[in-house]
Amino acid sequence: MTRLSAAFAKGHPALVCFVTAGDPTPAATPAILDALVEGGADVIELGMPFTDPMADGPAIQRANLRSLAAGTKTADILQMATDFRARHPDVPLVLMGYANPMITRGPEWFAAQAAKAGVDGVICVDIPPEEDGELGPYLRAHGISPIRLATPTTDAARLPAVLEGSSGFLYYVSVAGITGKQSAALASIEEAVNRIKQTATIPVAVGFGVRTPEQAGPIARVADGVVVGSALIDLIAEHGENAAGPVRDLVTALANAVHNARKVEA
Amino acid sequence: MNAPIPNSFRNQPDAQGHFGQFGGRYVAETLMPLILDLEAEYRKAKADPAFHAEFDDLLEHYVGRPSPLYFAPRLTEELGGAQVWFKRDELNHTGAHKINNCIGQILLAIRMGKTRIIAETGAGQHGVATATVCARFGLPCVIFMGATDVARQAPNVFRMKLLGAEVVPVTAGAATLKDAMNEALRDWVANVHDTFYIIGTAAGPHPYPELVRDFQSVIGKEARAQMLSRIGRLPDLLVAAIGGGSNAIGLFHPFLDDPSVKMMGVEAAGHGLDQLHAASLAGGRPGVLHGNKTYLLQDDDGQILEGHSISAGLDYPGIGPEHAWLKETGRVQYTSVTDTEALDGFQLLCRTEGIIPALEPAHAIAAVKKIAPTMDKDAIILANLCGRGDKDIFSVAEHLGVKL
């Protein structure tokens, strides 16, 4: 069993937490990652900053710019992953970002370096299944899960193409929009997850617009995992180098809500 | 590295939207279904005589096509070499070639039942052209424009507002064209159900590079027929300025399979290729941005760099994917001219022909100035005069140290 599949087989829904690598500085990221694990995150998504984050709202855009302004390089991010793997041998780590920084030295280089750093999965926002050849084959050859996004516009006819060649989990983007903006109605999320799970054999995690334990709990009742990003990014923006404590507190509350969501129901 | 020489240069892209290794559809999943719909609808429109009839009718009676083909006698005499001819797309309604594409795309939007139009703009020419067609067809229009450009292109902002558009200043990044395009994509992702994105150049995810090229190819089709009818032969060299590259591909494409016709695309070298510039082919390397793979100005980590040009319309760190492919196949030669050379070209055309060009085609004129004297007197250069310079007189005055 891979680290990713183990994270979704703990007998409770998984909490997936996103932060941007190098935000506010490369030096601050390890303590923030540790805070995510201590708070109870089951999967860590580490964002690779990009100058042009087209699918992200203002909060994550600013996180990208803070990180780049602090001088974060791809080599720094790979080092963060390597060090994380040494400290946390069992917690899955996923790199998330945009195509250009991932393929700029060649997809083979990126896949090999990510594998060496102990990365479990890669989410590339702007490589849809139609362009899978750009990165997917190299990730799979190195044992890294290409994790794809499904959205409210991904209909039943298209879903098999999205799932083809992906593994780890499916990231269901609950709103047609950018990160951190608005949240979808629970009923529409439940309907979508149920529809996807008729086809998908991998876990389905739901994200975009999930900020609080009160939102995360009900979603965890209908999905295999819940992704939280912008709310953590906002805390990092507010507390800067001292963000680890507040991040740990929010993740603890989120993990409580997500891990116990189905117990409360029963 | 040169790509293999194909049988025809005019049958790109392939079914997946690739021009060789370039182009493609690098977009978020939310947009993919819409991009596929757009492609299907464009295939139908392309095969529909009624679509072409409406497009042609609007180009003739609303835009003012065909645009003239003009022999420039005094410029030719002054340069002392090849005969210089211009395709006069600056005489179009709204003053540039941009309107050709906007007419085509808004007809597609209406076919698809979309009720809201968005667009990005740099200098404001594409924004004005988009606002114009939205007013003509009664559709609400939102234009994303970098806050820096809003400040330096105030007349065009006012034009767009007069035409009924909402202009949204974008403060992200350097607040120029690239950031405006990011913001337009964000709006589109959030409003895919009712919104059509009119992209202003032959770039972005497939099918945009293809459909923008097709709509702009009216320039080259007219020019080719006009040349044959006026002098009974084809030109020896085509010259056009390149930012994203829509006016250049529009001129070049109908001539690509005429082996006797050489072509030159002119990028903006800004302060010089060793300093700040916007010449993606000369100073960049392949990468992925804004939905397509193409040459980009970027650092070692793949972070995108800011372009610089005196011409806001050329100030973009990428280039349309078909140009990237035409460079690699060697079919088109690409060169670049600096801000200073473009200013010289601007004044040269004003003085010799009584035509005030936009700063974008001033780059093409600067390249013509260099190459015409090296060619025989019976050789023919055809350059695209893709926009008029009214919008640029303030920035030209400033660069020449004249206070208005």
Image (spheres, coloured by chain):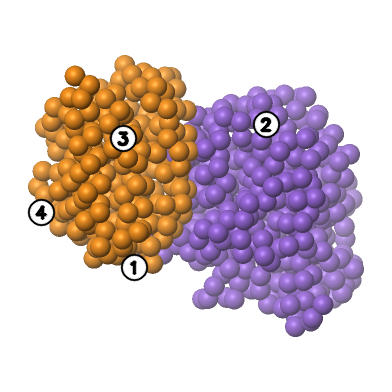
Chain colours: A orange, B purple
Locate residue A95 relative to residue B148 in the image: left or right.
left
What kind of residue is marked 2?
Thr
Q: In whole angstroms, how far apart are the C-alphas of marks 3 and 2?
A: 36 Å
Eye-nearest disc, 4 or 3:
3
Q: Which chain carries label 4?
A: A
Query: Which one is earlier in the sequence, the residue at label 4 or at label 3?
Result: 4
What kind of residue is marked 4?
Arg
Residue at the top extreme? A198
Locate residue A24 relative to residue B55 in the image: left or right.
left
What kind of residue is marked 3?
Glu
Under circle 3, the secondary element is helix
Q: In whole angstroms, how far apart are the C-alphas of marks 2 and 4?
A: 53 Å
Question: Residue beneath label 1, please?
Answer: A71
Residue lying at 39% horizontally and 43% vertically, measured from the top left: A125
The verdict on a common chain for dots 2 and 1 is no
The verdict on a common chain for dots 1 and 3 is yes
Query: In x, y percent, where is residue B17?
Result: 52, 37
Query: In x, y percent, where is residue B2?
Result: 48, 54
Residue lying at 87% horizontally and 57% vertically, measured from the top left: B70
Q: Mark 2 lies on which chain?
A: B
Q: Can residue A156 be seen in this view?
A: yes
**Other residues around mark 4 within 10 Å, as few (<14) / some (14–19) / many (≥20):** few
| Circle number at residue A87 | 4
What kind of residue is marked 1?
Gly
Query: Which one is earlier in the sequence, the residue at label 1 or at label 3?
Result: 1
Q: In whole angstroms, how far apart are the C-alphas of marks 1 and 4?
A: 24 Å
Eye-nearest disc, 2 or 1:
2
Question: Residue beneath label 2, please?
Answer: B115
Question: Residue beneath label 3, please?
Answer: A214
Under circle 4, the secondary element is helix
